[in-house]
Amino acid sequence: MRKHPLGDSFLEGIGVLRVSDRVVYREIDDKIVLINLDSGFYYSLNEVGCFIFNRILKSKEVGDILDEIESTFEVSQREAREDLDGFVESLRREKIILANG
């Protein structure tokens, strides 16, 4: 698989993301529900969010996740990067996922 250019993405330099130990999750009816044990908040992921989250669980590199978003959802590199940036930034802000470096 080719390495995806991250350009000015804040994901530049992040190889692999991981789910925090303080988060539990369950797949229910083709959706994933996450619960942050520290805050008590829960989150329900849409189709693209589930796709990305499952790849994070498999320890996929960020560039590989971008490639898979692009090919699976038939979107441009730019759209794939924006989707991943937005998703990761939201979950990092909530301390659901962390960068492994």
Image (cartoon, rainbow, N blue to C red):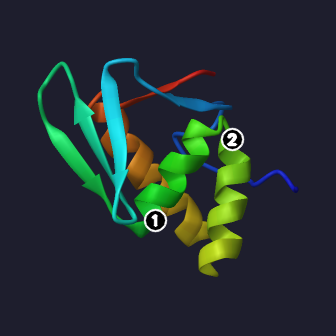
* Residue denoted by label 1: 48
Residue under the image location 71 percent in, 73 percent down: 71
* Kind of residue at badge 2: Lys
**Picture residue at 36% right of the left edge, 33% below the top:** 92
Q: Is residue 95 above or below residue 46?
A: above
Residue furthest left in the image: 40
**Residue 39 image-quadrant placement:** top left
- Quote the CA–CA distance across marks 1 and 2: 15 Å
Question: Regarding mark 2 in the picture, which secondary structure is present there?
Answer: loop
- Tell which residue pokes out farthest to the right in this image: 1
Query: Residue 26 or 20: which is nearer the viewer?
Result: 26
Q: Are marks 1 and 2 in contact (CB under 8 Å)?
A: no
Q: Residue at x 53, y 28 (%)?
A: 18
Q: Is residue 6 visible?
A: no
Label 1 CA crowd tier, 10 Å (few <14, some 14–19, many 20+): some
The image quadrant where one finds the C terminus is top right
Residue 93's x, y, as percent?
29, 33
Q: Nearer the viewer, residue 32 or 61?
A: 32
Q: Residue 60 carries which label?
A: 2
- Is 28 drawn above or below residue 56 in the view shown? below
Tell me if residue 99 comes above or below residue 29 in the rendering: above
Asked whether the viewer can see residue 2, the reply is yes
Q: In which quarter of the image is the N terminus?
A: bottom right
Q: Mark 1: which secondary structure?
A: helix
Question: In the displayed image of the protein, which residue is found farthest to the front?
Answer: 29
**Amino acid, disc 1:** Val
Q: List x then y, in percent, for residue 81.
A: 56, 59
